[in-house]
Image (tube, rainbow, N blue to C red):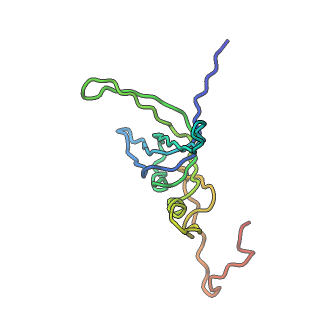
Amino acid sequence: MASRSVNKVILIGHLGRDSETRFTTGGAAKTTFSVATNRRWKDQQTGEWKEETDWHNIVLWRQENVANYLTKGVQVYIEGRLQTRNYEDKDGKKVYITEVVGDSVILLGSRGAAEAAGAEGAQAQPASAPRGPQRVPSAAPAAAPAPAPEEGDGGVVSDDDVPF
């Protein structure tokens, strides 16, 4: 009888720092960043609410186009697997590192929205901030830009021009 195993991680949190992309000697892109997740509970003895933050190191392979979107404060959905690696430090001591190797990344908010939520009196999300979940673009080529309006039509777009 074959045994089954599962190594699946799903995180929703905010980036603690801007992502960083480096390239291996073989040319593969490795993007790294950290994500903070919070949990809140009520202490049974004191009745006070407590909060705890956990930090997770994330690694994305061959997704160098993602780094521009993954900036400090942005809320993201990460799906991937846990991986533990080890090495010997300069003193000969073995060091273990556990990180999440991401398979899927979805932007849930923007840095502007995170800053606005934390600011006193801020009620509106900036107009330039994305609205709703956004999937980070893959390495596929971008769609062609919309054609420029022809001369004489004044740049007016009618309902017939909208593709949906």
At x 50%, y 45%, the residue is 36
Q: Quadrant of residue 43?
A: top right
Q: Nearer the viewer, residue 126 or 46?
A: 46
Q: Is residue 35 left or right of residue 20?
A: right
Q: Nearer the viewer, residue 17 or 47?
A: 47
Q: Is residue 164 left or right of residue 122?
A: right
Query: Residue 132 location in percent, x, y?
Result: 63, 58
Q: Mark yes or no: residue 59 visible.
A: no
Judge whether 120 appears above or below 40 on screen: below
Query: Residue 164 location in percent, x, y?
Result: 74, 66
Q: Quadrant of the N terminus?
A: top right
Q: Nearer the viewer, residue 83 or 43?
A: 43
Judge whether 107 appears above or below 97 on screen: below
At x 71%, y 74%, the residue is 161
Query: Residue 52 location in percent, x, y?
Result: 51, 42
Query: Residue 31 location in percent, x, y?
Result: 44, 45
Q: Mark yes or no: residue 106 visible.
A: yes
Judge whether 77 appears above or below 150 on screen: above
Q: Residue furthest front?
A: 46
Q: How many marks?
A: 0
At x 38%, y 45%, the residue is 22
Q: Residue furthest bottom?
A: 152
Q: Residue furthest left?
A: 91
